[in-house]
Image (spheres, grey):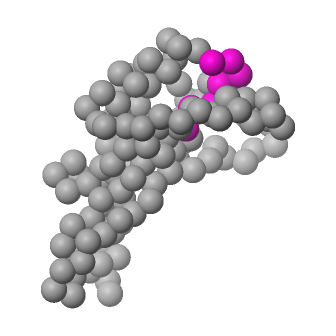
Amino acid sequence: MITREIDIASAVTRMQEQVDSILKNIDIEHAYDHFPDYADYAPMLPYIVWSYTEHAFYADNSIYYRYYTIALTLYEAERDISTEGAVEAALSDYYATKTTDYDENAAVYAVTYEFDLGGSNL
């Protein structure tokens, strides 16, 4: 259905704009899903990669309400409380959960924040 595809594309565009707006005051390079795969390019740590999961509530054979769970992951060589604090300050308008993991193969810390966008937020 073309209308649904346009509606989803529009919502995803608004969501990406909202996440960019949240991250605009943080001086950390960020990208949706991954950075471009160039042979001579790798982002300097710290950097942020984010993705989303779509959730929809259906009623009367149509989508009544749609929202997105954003997973925003901060990659750091060492845990830096001031960097994490800057991200948390940017997310202060949202209820975000925080998990931390260490990837031994890549030798990086991954701090993931999850929060929801949708409805009146989009």
Question: Considering depth in this image, is 36 or 84 the residue closer to the camera?
Answer: 84
* Residue at the spot 64% in from the left edge and 44% down from the top edge: 35
Determine which quarter of the picture holds residue 85: top left
Residue 61 in view in this figure: yes
Question: Considering depth in this image, is 109 or 24 the residue closer to the camera?
Answer: 109
| Residue extending furthest toward the top | 82
In the shown orientation, is residue 86 left or right of residue 3? Answer: right
> Is residue 75 a member of the stretch shown in magenta?
yes
Residue 27 in view in this figure: no
* Residue at the spot 48% in from the left edge and 46% down from the top edge: 71
Question: Considering depth in this image, is 92 or 102 the residue closer to the camera?
Answer: 102
Image location (x, y in percent) of residue 26 = 44, 22
Image location (x, y in percent) of residue 101 = 65, 35
Residue 120 position (above or below residue 114): below
Determine which quarter of the picture holds residue 74: top right
Residue 107 position (above or below residue 81): below
Image location (x, y in percent) of residue 90 = 35, 26
In the shown orientation, is residue 60 left or right of residue 53? Answer: left
> Is residue 65 a member of the stretch shown in magenta?
no
Q: Which residues are magenta?
A: 73-79
* Residue at the spot 32% in from the left edge and 87% down from the top edge: 1
* Residue at the spot 31% in from the left edge and 69% down from the top edge: 56
Residue 117 position (above or below residue 57): above
